[in-house]
Image (cartoon, rainbow, N blue to C red):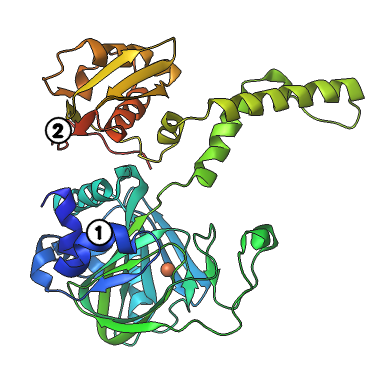
Amino acid sequence: MSHPDVLSVLFGPEIGPRFLSEHWPLEPCWYLGPASRLADVIGLPCLQSPAALLELPVSRVTVQANTKVLKSLYGKEGLSGAERAELRALYEAGFQLYFHELEALPEPLEHLLEQVAQALGISRGMLSVNAFACIAGSKNPPPLHWDPSESILLQCVGSKRWKLARNDFFPFPTFNHLFGSPVPSEHRDELEAEYPSTPPRVEELVVRPGAAIFVPRGAWHCAIAQEEPSLHLDINIKAPSLSSEMGRWIHRRLRRHRALRQPLTRNMAPAELEETLAVARRTLQEMAEELSVADLVRLGILGLQSWPYSYRRTREARVSLSGERTLKVQLDGESCEVKVPARARSVAKWIIERDAARPFGVGELPPSESEQEILPLLDLLEDLGVLQRLKAKASPRRRASR
Ligand SMILES: [Fe+2]
């Protein structure tokens, strides 16, 4: 399946083509379609039982009773025999096992993630896979809550009942929250409306193998075990936002100034404090003026995929460098100027001077530039319609950073 098709495979022929315009990023949806369409993923032997899952390297396995974490074990190098036995006993006793970030994903699952990332227009590195396993009638699942990330849930084994509702009073929260619990004070000024006094009206659905559910960031949800064991995957999507990414960017820039790294004490003279503040003001002002689409791309909006991509020209465009840091793009008689990230200037030059008809891979680009510097520029040109991204090459591929 190619990446535009993946949404139709997951959410069916009705919702799939409308997913990006009508559901992403706020409107929950689901498709209780045939298991056969996802058989290569949900039928993977390692996803058929908690015992098989416990053999996989996994960032962490936790056991929760409602909101309390009873057990948390780290398994990046694999869990020990004793740890696996302990978790199996807790599973048999009725507790749900929560596998955080499965490692070394089997090829069909890795392929699915790549396709989903491309369809959503974000980096593969922002997707991870969690798994949940519980016995029939398992108790103590987390009650109605929201998470600060998007999820695509895939039922692999057995069944589960889900409660799901849009979050209309507070879109895109940046923290986890259980219905009715106090909102932490540091997040209170993010609420856009009064906290609901009654639980939201939820949709209820019973899912079986093959079901796919989209749980948007902030959507209310909880799962209830049925009369048979259940194992489901959670493709967790931490799509970056400007607020989440910009903090790091500002911090990096401020850190460049010795005056802004020095300790602040109340013994500092007023003149010294003034001087420090002036450096901070100047830096923030410079940053505000420089902020461009390319910076947003660099901050992660389109992601910094770390495997080679090819691009080709799609439109008659004249691209020239005008000035030190500006790229002039003329498309269909209209022209616009975009700022080239400073360290990508040699790449911009290379793109302009090369044979326009020949597709090229990132691997061919000038070796002095890192992918992190090249890709924002390519993404920017893709955004402008100058270049079109071709299918990702199968190899060599490096693991995306998390
Ligand atoms: Fe959740």
Residue at position x 49%, y 77% in the image: 66
Q: Secondary structure at mark 1?
A: loop
Quadrant into which the C terminus falls = top left
Q: Quadrant of residue 247?
A: top right
Give the class, few, some or many, for how many residues have Cα within 10 Å of label 2's Cα (few <14, many ≥20).
few
Give the class, few, some or many, for how many residues have Cα within 10 Å of label 1's Cα (few <14, many ≥20).
some
Circle 1 or circle 2, nearest the eye = 2
Q: Is residue 124 above or below residue 376?
A: below
Nearer to us in this view, 223 or 166: 166
Q: Amino acid at mark 1?
A: Glu
Q: Which mark is residue 55?
A: 1
Nearer to us in this view, 266 or 366: 366
Q: Quadrant of ligand 1?
A: bottom left
Q: Position of residue 352 (x, y in %)?
A: 25, 14
Residue at position x 22%, y 70% in the image: 49
Q: Which mark is residue 395?
A: 2
